[in-house]
Amino acid sequence: MMAAKARISAAILLVCIILPLLASAFLDHLPEVLEHDSRNKDVTIRGDNSIVRANDNDFTLPRSHDKKNERSLREKKHKKKKKNKKGKKSHKDKTFDFDHLFGGNQQEGDEFSPYLQPFDVPQTTEEHEPAENYDGLREGFYQKTCPQTENIIRNGLIRAFQNDSTIAAAFPRLLLHDCFVNGCDGSILLDTTPSGARVEKLAGTNGATVKGFELIDEIKAELERQCPGIVSCSDILVYLSRDAFVLSGLPNYNVLAGRRDGMESNEANVVGNLPLPGDTVDQMIDLFQKKGLNSEDLVVLIGAHSIGVAHCFNFLYRLDEPEKAQMLDPRLAGVMRFMCANQMNTLPFDPTTQYKMDSIFYKQLMMKKGLIESDQILAQDIRTRGFVQKFGDDEMGWFDKFGKAMNKLGAIEVLTGNQGQMRRQCRAVN
């Protein structure tokens, strides 16, 4: 018995001596486990220059017996991580710089969410080209009387755009429908007038196809709190239209302001004063000329259809007339039939970049992919086809002309000086 116990004790002693020696001998062959983020389940393991398991977010460092080199590598790694952490913001915290979009007018403290999916915005060819002056209208009109005007308007639009990206196309449409009927006087915003006549917004060519009135109410209320009786509803609409285009990718352009608001709005005045989907080129050119705009302005401004949608009732009829159907790309015709079971359904003017102002819209017209007949025929008529082709090939050239054309549009039959009034709210006269 005693002999057996002695043998066991000797065996235990032998194991205690030999195992540490074996561990020391094979230490270099054990894998090295590197630092990793405790939130990640995967760990990067490297041994003998081979990775056993890895996560894309981990760093894999070479093994080194040189303590100084190993410490140096770890310090570099730590500094890199620290630098990345400092320079990198989460998507939630990230803010989008609108300062370069709107010509540096953003005030301190104005931050906007990247929820807007911002686009790369080309710069104009010149740093600042003064807009053409029109009687009573000028740039920076509210600079002294209400310097926060443009920021309040812009911030309101951005908040709305975050909830509904289709809102951008609403304001240019409202502006054109306002300016072409008795001038740019905000009359399309009125719900009622002293005469009691049915107002413009109730006309068939407006109705369900125009929106954005609630946002204008909110912005006007804020402006009245900041600067009572200073900023007109008609100017708000012009600024909103500019900002909508800039949010959609157009380079910033300077807006002329100084309009006063009209006191009448009559549905009867709409008839014959707005372009219609089935208009001929002759009719469109004639209408635009009556408003002080030429055929080039017509093609420039129709490019606003680069964003927005059209209701099916405005184009579905094209499928029922063989001559008109021939002007349609067959695939687009198929989409029209499929999507327009309900006449109130909508399709984007530009399905490729629906929310971005770019020249793709013009290229699509050249390929018979225009939804609206009056848009499409501009690519066929000898008087306008050249402009469609030109703007499709020269996006920057179109951008440069667009702001000028918008200022011409916004100057149609304006009320200035002591004309009209400065409405306290945009839906009713004072």
Image (tube, rainbow, N blue to C red):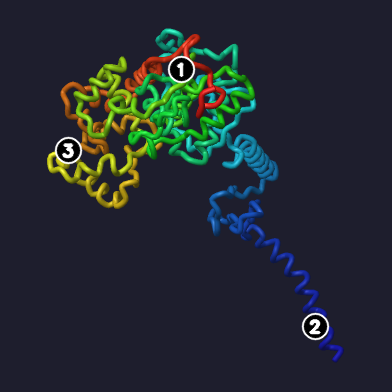
Q: Name the residue under label 2.
A: 8
Q: Which residue is drawn at 84% across and 86% down?
A: 5
Q: Residue furthest front?
A: 195
- Using the image as rendered, state which of residue 421 and residue 158 is in the foreground: 421
Q: Quick one: quadrant of the C terminus? A: top right
Name the disc covering residue 311, or none: none
Distance in Å between CA atoms under marks 2 and 1: 98 Å
Q: Position of residue 215 (x, y in %)?
A: 52, 33
Q: Mark 1 points at which residue?
A: 255
Q: Where is residue 393 in the image (x, y as percent from the top left)?
A: 27, 26
Residue 286's image quarter? top left
- Where disc 3 sits, the SS reads loop
Q: Residue at x 64, y 27 (%)?
A: 109
Name the disc covering residue 327, or none: 3
Residue type at tag 3:
Met
Residue 277 seen in the figure = yes
- Where disc 2 sits, the SS reads helix
**Above or below: residue 339 compared with residue 134:** below
Residue type at tag 2:
Ile
- Give the number of callouts: 3
Q: Where is residue 272 in the image (x, y as percent from the top left)?
A: 28, 26
Residue type at tag 1:
Val
